[in-house]
Structures are given as C-alpha cells and as structure tokens.
Image: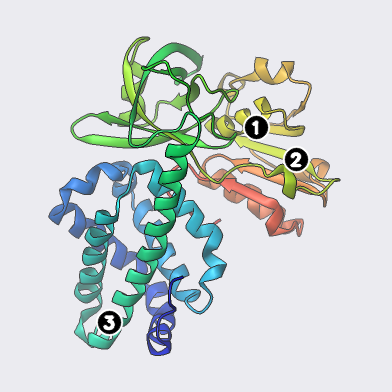
Amino acid sequence: MIEPLPVKYRKIIAASVPLLEARGEQLTSHFYKRMMCLNPEVKKYFNQTRQRDGSQAKSLARSVLLYAKNIEQLSRLEGFLESIIQKHVALDIQPAHYHIVGSNLLASMEEVFGEEIANPTFMKAWTQGYDQLAEILIGSEHEEYVHLYREPGGWSSFRPFLIKDRVVEGPGIISLYLVPEDRNLVLSGEAGQYITLKVMLEHECRRSYSLSGPLSNKGYRITIKKIGSVSSYLHELEVGQRLKLRPPLGEFVINERALSPNADLIFIAGGIGVTPLAAFAHAGFQAKLLYYAKTEEDRIFMDEFREMTNITLIDVESMPTKKDLRAHVTRFSQVYTVGPVEFMRAVNKILDFMNFPPNQRHFDFFGSTYDL
C-alpha cells in the first residue's frame, strides 16, 4: 500500500491550484520543449502534431491540476488514472521513462515559476508528490503488462502482423485487416478498445486505432482516416506488408453487468468517431445509432449497420441538435459519444441543457483528453 504524503506537503500541493490554473499550460509547454531537447529518445511516444498544436501540453496541464485538486482524496482520480495506465501500457511505457519525465517536469517548475515560488519546500513537496504518483502508475502498469502476457493470445512488447486485406470505406478512409505473422491466436480484446502500432518515418512513431470490426482471436480490423503523417503512411501500405502491434487496451467499454435492467444504449458518432461504436454494434449491443457526418459519403459501414437487427439507425444531419437528443435520450439511457472534440462538446452541452446525469455519459478521445 502506498503511504500518503505528509500533511505539510499535501497542503503545499493543494495550495498550488491557483498557480496551476493560471500558469499550468506555460509550465507543461516548457516541460515538453525541454524534454524533447534533452531526451529526444522519448519523442516516439508523443504525437508530434499534438505537440505542435499544444493539445498535449493542455492535457498534461489538466492532469497536474487534477492531481493537485484531489491530493487529499486520490481515490477520486481512479477512473482518470486508469485511462492513463491503459495509454501508457499501449505505448509500452517503462519505469525508466518516469525518471525522465519527473526530472524534466520538476526542473521546469523551477525554471518557469522561479525560486521565489519554487523554493526548496515547494520543490520537496512536488518531488514527493510526483514520486508517489509514479509509484502508483508503475505498479498498476506492471500488473497490466503481466495480465496481457498471461491472457490467451496475449503478448508483450510489439508483435509482427501482416495486412491480410485493405478496403476503401469512403473518401480518405480505409480499413486494414491484420493477422499475426506467426499465425497463432491473438487476444480478442473488448469492443471499444484500441490497438497501438509503431511505424518508422523520419523517426519511430506510435499510434493507437480503435478496433472497428467483430471481435476475433484470429486478427483485427482497424479503420483509418488520412489526416496526418502516420495515417498517410498507413494508407500507402499494401496487402502482405508488415506492421508491429501492441495488444488491445482501453477503458471505453460497455460493462453489461453494471447496466440497469431498463437501461437503453445510445451511440452518438461524429465522422470517423464511429469506429469504436461499430465494434460495439458488432458485439451485439442493442442500441440506437445517431451517426453525424458532413456528407452521406462520409458515413462508413452503413451497409453493415443496416444488416444488424440490434442497431436502430436514426436519421440525422451533420451536427447534433436538441431535437435529436430529446427525441431519443431517456432518463435511463447510457450515452456513448465519439467524434471530434468540438462535436463531443456540442453533445455534452445539449446533455447539460437536458440535465442528463454525468455518470451516464461516456466519451472516447482519439489522442489527448480534453475538458468538455
């Protein structure tokens, strides 16, 4: 069991909340620049597009702030930490990486906040706080690594797969069907989870893609929209070419045992965000699907959905409206939403207007997690 921090250090971390609210993004932006310069070996673990647009810095600033706000009750962060654990294991993060991150983050606090704020007592508190959080994450991630390796079809590190088929789904969207090179069984995972692959461009890159097809212990289907350097590279691959994968991970899943008997499922998709919801549909969940896209051509998998007796397709336009959600979301609904961040914000705003319970809303983020 992890010992709580001394009271005096918890108070210092809690008192840092106004500082982090005002200057958190300044801190994390400086941190990323510092770490990428001094420790370029970790570059492969980060999406460089999100480095450039600042979204990863915003996400990390939010994480540090949440930790400070909940320092007296870290149990409140269990769901949030589980998401981090899943992402870290997907990327194959190891204990040594925590030293790199910690040394750069703590040095950034001194460099950004200055010695008047980041005095020895302040730094001692945050050093102990970081070490505590790292210990929690390293322990939980080790358990997840062991679990993945021991599961039937599971494996450690990156496993070679071959592209068995390549299907054009729509404008700029393809599906890749992947099978293990060794022809042994694979961990089927759960609907809503993602696999992580690594490719070599100018440098090694790691990206995660949701499972989009029926669960299988023989292989996976992932569906990719051409929007960046890695996705563009994947679009150029042909049948028979090789990719290296991590096993399925992710906490965006439907826990049937936790559903109330009268619960109804609502799937709300925005564009390529339909992919994990397609996996839910293939898993047999009975649901209404509200699928928003710019054009009819952009709505992929429509033939599959029309053949499913468990999915009721709702006719909608390109963006969600109060009318749409009021017509289909009940007080018993569990709502699963995936799409661009602004799309999910629009859905969340409507659900707020409807006074819909937050614990019945489920969102999946492709990449950095944002506040909605």
Alpha carbons under labels 1 and 2: distance apart: 10 Å
Alpha carbons under labels 3 and 1: distance apart: 46 Å
Q: Disc number at residue 124?
A: 3
Q: Position of residue 25 (x, y in %)?
A: 34, 64
* Count of marks placed on residues: 3
Residue 369 visible within the image: no
Q: Earlier in the sequence, mark 2 or mark 3?
A: 3
Q: Circle 1 sits on which residue?
A: 280
Report the amino acid beneath label 3. Lys
Q: Disc number at residue 136?
A: none
Q: Secondary structure at mark 1?
A: helix
Q: Give the residue displayed 32% in from the left and 14% down from the top.
A: 241
Where 289 falls versus 5 (above or below)? Answer: above
Q: Is residue 169 left or right of residue 131?
A: right
Residues at discs 3 and 1 in contact (Cβ within 8 Å): no
Q: Residue furthest right?
A: 262
Report the amino acid beneath label 2. Leu
Q: Position of residue 287 (x, y in %)?
A: 76, 34
Report the amino acid beneath label 1. Phe
Q: Position of residue 142 (x, y in %)?
A: 39, 52
Alpha carbons under labels 2 and 3: distance apart: 48 Å
Where 155 falls versus 108 (above or below)? Answer: above
Residues at discs 1 and 2 in contact (Cβ within 8 Å): yes
**Which class describes the residues within 10 Å of circle 1: few (<14), some (14-19), or many (20+)?**
many
Q: Position of residue 184 (x, y in %)?
A: 43, 19
* Depth order, front residue of 26/283: 283
Q: Earlier in the sequence, mark 1 or mark 2?
A: 2
Q: Secondary structure at mark 3?
A: helix
Q: Circle 2 sits on which residue?
A: 265
Q: Earlier in the sequence, mark 3 or mark 1?
A: 3
**Which class describes the residues within 10 Å of circle 3: few (<14), some (14-19), or many (20+)?**
some
**Which class describes the residues within 10 Å of circle 2: few (<14), some (14-19), or many (20+)?**
many
